Amino acid sequence: MDKVAIRLFCFLGLFILVACWELVYPRRSFEISKTKRWLSNISLIFLGNLSVKLILPLTTLEASLQAETLDFGFFNFFALPYHLEFILSFIFLDFSIYLQHIVFHKIPFLWKIHRVHHVDLGFDVSTGVRFHPFEIILSMFIKIGLVFLLGVSPSTVFFFELILNGASLFNHGNIYISSKIDKVLRCFVVTPDMHRVHHSSKPRETHSNFGFNLPWWDYLFGTYIAQSQKNHKSMEIGLPFFRDLKFLNLFQILILPFKLKS
């Protein structure tokens, strides 16, 4: 089985697993039609992947292979043991995703693109793939540059992207996890309850909990909020100026970055 097939198999398997978990043990109940939300959210991932293939000249894995062939990048220059290289590469890439997330919140024109992810009035596994094609292209461009400059090995790139995609599906899941288990998990990974705070409509909470895989960066840099002011069942999801159901429509999502509201 090639790497593309493995990635697709893992993505679909985890998506179905989390979706089933949401049906059996949901964290919240929603009045908004799941069918309409899911149709738009899932369509975005196809548009994003198509845009990347049409616009970018190579993938992160191809960038890694090129760096390895040219003997270019930090980890290709310093002969570190593979396991140490793997750990350092994974940590650095994860930290870069955290920083990128903050930048997309802080810089106005990037926030206009990223807010597509936050305008969703629900919070479930489909929210984990709700990113504007512009954001997917920019994020991929940044990752390609980092992978090439660092000289990250192809196997590390492959594993990191599997984990990153899986983490996005997991931590956006509308799934119930007991508070005791959640407290333990937060020592190692970003949990749905931790990330749900990031999707609160309260600005202070929206601009917190930026981690995707590892929660440590939020703890270290003071961007962590343990719980929303409201409990998870009653907290308002989304953004204050975009409460209209029309923003669940795919066309409205695609033109959202060009709207004046912030």
Image (cartoon, rainbow, N blue to C red):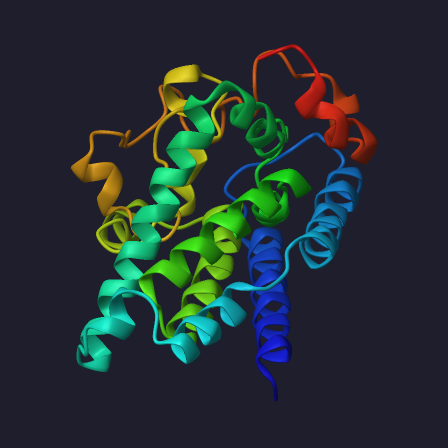
Residue farthest to the front, as pictured: 70
**Residue at coordinates 38% horizontally, 23% vertically from top-left?**
205
How many marks on residues? 0
* Residue 211 visible in this rendered orientation of the protein: no
User: In which quadrant of the rendered image does the N terminus lie?
Assistant: bottom right
Query: Horizontally, is 47 left or right of 18 in the view?
Result: right
Q: Residue at x 46, y 31 (%)?
A: 104
Does residue 171 sit above or below 228 in this rendering?
Answer: below
Q: Who is closer to the viewer here, 89 or 72?
A: 72
Of 107 and 239, the residue lying toward us: 107
Q: Residue at x 62, y 56 (%)?
A: 19
Residue 170: percent from left, percent from top: 48, 54
Q: Is residue 97 above or below residue 60?
A: above
Up-down relation of residue 69 to residue 222 (above or below)? below
Residue pictured at 53% horizontal, 71% vertical: 62
Q: Is residue 38 visible?
A: yes
34 lies left or right of 19: right
Residue 203: x, y in percent? 43, 16
Q: Quadrant of the C terminus?
A: top right
**Residue 132 placement (x, y as % from top left):** 65, 38
For the view shown, which residue lies furthest in the bottom direction?
A: 1
The residue closer to the viewer here, 169 or 84, is: 84
- In the rendered structure, the answer to whether residue 121 lies left or right of residue 172 reads right
Q: Position of residue 219 (x, y in %)?
A: 20, 38
Q: Quadrant of residue 72?
A: bottom left
Is 178 placed left or right of 59 in the picture? left
